[in-house]
Image (spheres, rainbow, N blue to C red):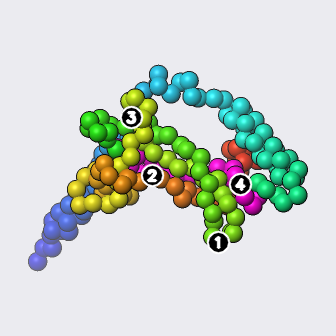
Amino acid sequence: MKRTHFPHTLSLLLIILMIVSGCNNNQQQQQDQRITVNADNVKNHIIDIKLAREYTKSFRDERSRLDSLTQRKYLSTEFDLANAESLNRDVFALLLEQKDKEGNPAAGIRMYNGRKYNETLKRYEVTLVLVPYDKNGNDIINKLTAQTTAIRLPGVSSAQAQGDGGNAIDNAPRCPEVCDNGNSGLNGPTGP
């Protein structure tokens, strides 16, 4: 009686095909998530990392100097300025997918400075409040809450733009509490 390995070989071949197909689908999904960039629109905003390090160091140094001048440590208790705030890409995608009243997509994101009281730390903090803006530079104020129809974004169930009420973005993790590993030099000395 001769044993044939054909069924096992066929099963193995099907498994390999499914794995390869899954890898191709994953690569396609990653390519679909690419954000297009118009280089002409960003070239005036790009600065050398050395200059960026100088800017952030100057900010940290001056904040410390100003805080030491006041007896109450005003900047630490009433106007706490973070070194940085971070938001994931889905937040930016959600804002950029908003449409103005005529149905045109957002032209960019405006970052307002705000001040809020942190109940946990019992102090006021300066925070970034983000909203999209239109091609004329006007803020787009829409509802960003989850709905059953609308924009499909990775990590966000869905969102529906509406004209009444509206939302903005806040509550970004703050540095020095949540920072990079220190190698960029933007929050202090760079690594060796």
Q: Earlier in the sequence, mark 1 or mark 4?
A: 4
Residue 20 image point, x, y percent: 28, 53
Nearer to us in this view, 128 or 94: 128
Q: Real-space Cα distance between discs 1 and 4? A: 16 Å
Q: Residue furthest bottom?
A: 1
Gap between marks 3 and 2 measured at Cα: 15 Å
For disc 2, the marked residue is 168
Q: Which residues are magenta?
A: 76-97
Q: Amino acid at mark 1?
A: Thr
The reply to whether dot 2 and dot 4 touch (C-beta < 8 Å) is no
Q: Nearer the viewer, residue 174 or 40?
A: 174
Q: Is residue 71 above or below residue 111?
A: below
Based on the picture, tell me whether residue 79 belongs to the magenta stretch: yes
Q: Earlier in the sequence, mark 2 or mark 4?
A: 4
Q: Are marks 1 and 4 in contact (CB under 8 Å)?
A: no
Residue 120: mark in rendering:
1
| Quarter of the figure that contains the C terminus | top right
Marked residue nearer the N-terminal end (4 or 3): 4
Q: Is residue 123 above or below residue 40?
A: below
Q: Is residue 58 left or right of residue 97?
A: right
Q: Nearer the viewer, residue 87 or 65?
A: 65
In the image, what residue occupies the spot 84% across and 60% down?
Answer: 72
Name the residue carrying label 3. Answer: 134
Whether residue 35 appears in this view of the structure is no
Q: Quadrant of residue 99?
A: top left
Residue at (53, 43) in percent of width and height: 111
Q: Residues within 10 Å of mark 4 (few under 14, many from 20)?
A: some
| Residue 42 makes an appearance in the image | yes
How far, Cα to Cα, is label 4 from label 3?
A: 30 Å
* Structural crowding at the residue carrying mark 3, measured as other residues with C-alpha within 10 Å and reported as few (<14), some (14–19) or many (≥20): some
Q: Are marks 1 and 3 in contact (CB under 8 Å)?
A: no
